[in-house]
């Protein structure tokens, strides 16, 4: 493709939820999109890096979906996350620009990994309009991946402890501290709602295919990868 041609012009003709119009997408357009996704049945298609919906901030949820549609949408997010399999999924990853995410981690990992990464089981939960603040200054760095960047992982340093503020699916206020791997999941999914992908925060020299991680960098911590690939262990 010629690099001097703007392939799209203003806005994104492939995306009816493009917010470039006044006021952004209407509640009706969002609700219709969700109905279409659910009507297709089965798991939801996950959009990948390069789709603008992953780079726009998502809209606060304020009733754009009826209670019954919200329930069905959350159920579909859960099934899609489990089928992937993944430990979290944010609405923009299925093309829906709302601040809604689900997380769940059965944490089927060896004891040494559980200890090093704090990867303890995280029950299913729904995060509506989440935000987080770091608690303390400790940062921890591990390989992580994303369903919207399939096949790749990179080392990301993140605050070891965060305080989450969110609503649950019933609209009740949740304020809770997270540590270990659940803290990483909360940050990764909330970042999606701000248009941030993990690669934005990663040590880019750590970028490794899933095959390379499995073959070489499956140690509980990434020090050996840092030495071999030439990145600094952040923290
Ligand atoms: Zn992700």
Image (cartoon, rainbow, N blue to C red):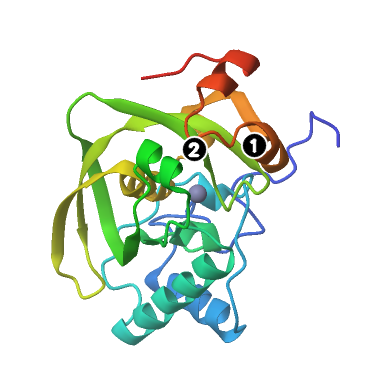
Residue 88 x, y percent position in the rendering = 44, 57
Query: Which one is closest to the eye, mark 2 or mark 1?
Result: 1
Q: Quadrant of residue 91?
A: bottom left
Instruction: Report the side of 123 relative to 44 (left or right).
Output: left
Front-most of residues 221 and 62: 221
- Which comes before the other along the chain, label 2 or label 1? 2
Question: Which of 232/228 is in front?
Answer: 228
Quadrant where the C terminus lies?
A: top left
Residue toward you, 170 or 222 = 222
Q: Is residue 17 visible?
A: no
The residue positioned 31% from the left and 26% from the top of the image is 139
| Pick the front one: 40 or 104 | 104
Question: Does the residue tagged 2 have its C-beta within 8 Å of any atom of ligand 1?
Answer: yes
- The x and y percentages for residue 21 are 48, 54
Outermost residue on the right side: it is 1
Q: Quadrant of the N terminus?
A: top right
Q: Is mark 1 within 8 Å of ligand 1?
A: no
Residue in view at x 64 percent, y 44 percent: 50
Circle 2 crowding by C-alpha within 10 Å: few under 14, some 14–19, many from 20: many
Q: State whether residue 66 is above or below residue 233.
A: below
Figure check: 90 above or below 191: below
Cα distance between the residues tagged 2 and 1: 17 Å
Location of mark 2 (residue)? 198
Where residue 94 is drawn, which disc sits there? none
For label 1, count other residues whose C-alpha is less than 10 Å away and answer few (under 14), some (14-19) or many (20+). Answer: some
Q: Can residue 183 be seen at all in this image of the molecule?
A: yes
Q: Percent from the top left, x then y, of residue 180?
A: 31, 42
Spot occupied by residue 36 in the image (x, y as percentages of width and height): 56, 80
Which residue appears at 75% of the width and 43% of the height?
7
Label 2 sits on a secondary structure element that is helix
Q: Check disc 1 and report the residue beneath it.
A: 213
Secondary element at tag 1: helix
């Amino acid at each position: 493709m010629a690099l001097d041609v703007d392939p799209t012009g203003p806005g994104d003709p492939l995306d009816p939820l493009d917010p470039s119009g006044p006021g952004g997408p209407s509640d009706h357009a969002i609700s219709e999109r969700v109905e279409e996704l659910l009507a297709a049945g089965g798991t939801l298609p996950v959009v990948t890096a390069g789709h603008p919906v992953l780079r726009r901030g998502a809209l606060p949820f304020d009733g754009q979906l009826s209670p019954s549609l919200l329930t069905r949408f959350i159920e579909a997010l859960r099934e899609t996350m489990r089928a992937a399999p993944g430990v979290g999924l944010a609405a923009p990853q299925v093309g829906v620009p709302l601040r809604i995410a689900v997380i769940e981690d059965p944490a089927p990992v060896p004891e040494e990994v559980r200890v090093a990464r704090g990867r303890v089981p995280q029950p299913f939960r729904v995060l509506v309009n989440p935000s987080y603040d770091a608690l303390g200054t400790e940062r921890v760095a591990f390989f992580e991946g994303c369903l919207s960047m399939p096949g790749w992982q990179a080392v990301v340093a993140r605050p070891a402890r965060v305080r989450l503020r969110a609503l649950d699916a019933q609209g009740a206020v949740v304020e809770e501290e997270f540590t270990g791997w659940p803290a990483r999941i909360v940050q990764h999914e909330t970042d999606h709602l701000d248009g941030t992908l993990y690669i934005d925060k990663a040590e880019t020299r750590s970028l490794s295919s899933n095959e390379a991680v499995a073959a070489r960098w499956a140690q509980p911590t990434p020090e050996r990868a840092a030495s071999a690939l030439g990145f600094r262990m952040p923290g």
